[in-house]
Image (spheres, rainbow, N blue to C red):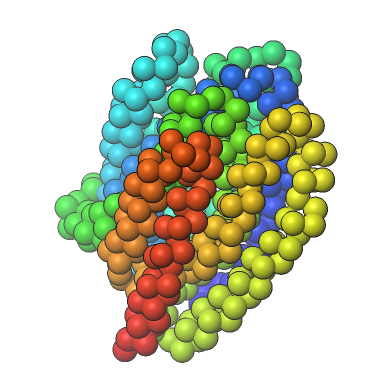
Amino acid sequence: MHYPLARATSWNLAGYLYLIVASLIATPIFIHALGIDLYGQYLLLMGVIGFASAIDLGLSQAVVRALSQGSGSAVSDRSSLWTTSLLLFTLTGLLAGFLSILVISFFHLSFALLLTIFLIITFNNLLSHFLTLPQSLGRFGWFNVKTFLVGTTATLLTALLAFFGFGLLGIFFAQLLSYLVTLLLLICFSFRFFPFSRYTLPSWQSARPLLSFGWRNQVGKLIGQTGAQYGKFMLAAISPLAVSAYSLSQALVMKAASSINQLTTALYPASSRDAHQPAIRSLYHRLQIGLLVFSLLGVILFYTLGNLVLTTWLHDPSLVVAVHSVLSIFIWYFVILILTPLPSTILDSHGHPGITSFFTFLTVGLEICLAFYFLPRLGMLAPPIAGLIAVAATTPPLLLVTERVLLEK
């Protein structure tokens, strides 16, 4: 490893924990200011933006892997890789923006709001390109610039704007400005390693390995985002309360599970370089055992303090009851889900993104089918129960396949 994994993970966790605290402060203010109906519409629009962020041809992982493995490559080759990546991310950003606008045009939004969301999606893809550089270098202070700037705007500033009566246009425009500022900062950082004077023309020779690796990762990302967002749109037919309760519960669980992504983000470049080293295998096993213990502690805390914390946090009795009922299922989903990020990172870094995508497809496909089957009978509880059954069925095979890959020479 060319950087301390503990320091890299600490940077990621610092940004992540800050974002959790900011979100916990902002959410009740935001719900009270907008009301359940408008808050539900905001969640649906954020769901579209979240899904659009996955339309990048799997380039993020591909570029980080290429930069991590090619530290000794010629300057011209790395410059060609960088400019080719920039072009591909720009094109995918425009495509994701146009597709998203087609979807949300049915929401009867103003042209200004549609344009703002289109630009957010496009800038987000460009940010993904510039974030590959600090991640590949292990410069996770710079990598977390987006977390602090965009995250602060999407939580604390958003709640403040809603409190003072700004509508969805003002809220999303503030988010757009935060993306723009973050993009400019990361462009300045990239010039230290890829000066504009050394930019070369994009080339198919550089694009081909990126696309070859990336498209297999892309399938998994799209399916993963489908699994993350479909429940909101499914429950929109029931009520805004169902959308809000499900989204809040899912967000709490996913924030806890995503804490592991801060570790996997730091581990990925090192694992790409030292894929078959015994140290990586040993570290993986120790981390998985620690994660299982962490998840079981989370279950104990939920059943002892969950209702009190939700009541103090949300204040709305009907929302508290709904969120608690969904969380009582999601907490067991969390216990199993927390064991999957590290295997996925190991498989991707060992050159097997197709396996990760296959298991993602299997899990999400089973979950959505079960959710539609359960919906008439269980209503709001259908998506979390379907998710629990699906992840319980597919995680054991994923862990077994990862063990086999780790033992490859």
Question: Residue visible at 37% across and 57% down?
Answer: 363
As drawn, is 72 to the left or to the right of 109? left
As drawn, is 209 to the left or to the right of 170? left
Question: Residue visible at 48% across and 43% down?
Answer: 382
Of the pair 114 and 292, the residue shown nearer to us: 292
Which quadrant does the C terminus fall into?
A: bottom left
> Does residue 222 lie above or below 138 as drawn?
above
Residue placed furthest toward the front: 377
> Does residue 225 lie above or below 238 as drawn?
below
Locate residue 16, reporting x and y percent.
64, 52
Residue placed furthest toward the left: 204
> Does residue 59 lie above or below 165 as drawn?
below
Which quadrant of the figure has residue 51? Answer: top left
Locate residue 241, reporting x and y percent.
60, 28
Locate residue 161, reporting x and y percent.
69, 21
Of the pair 277 and 191, the residue shown nearer to us: 277
**Residue 129 visible (yes or no):** no
Question: Residue visible at 65% across and 37% down?
Answer: 322
Question: Residue visible at 43% across and 86% down?
Answer: 277
Locate residue 145, reporting x and y percent.
60, 47
Which quadrant of the figure has residue 374? Answer: top left
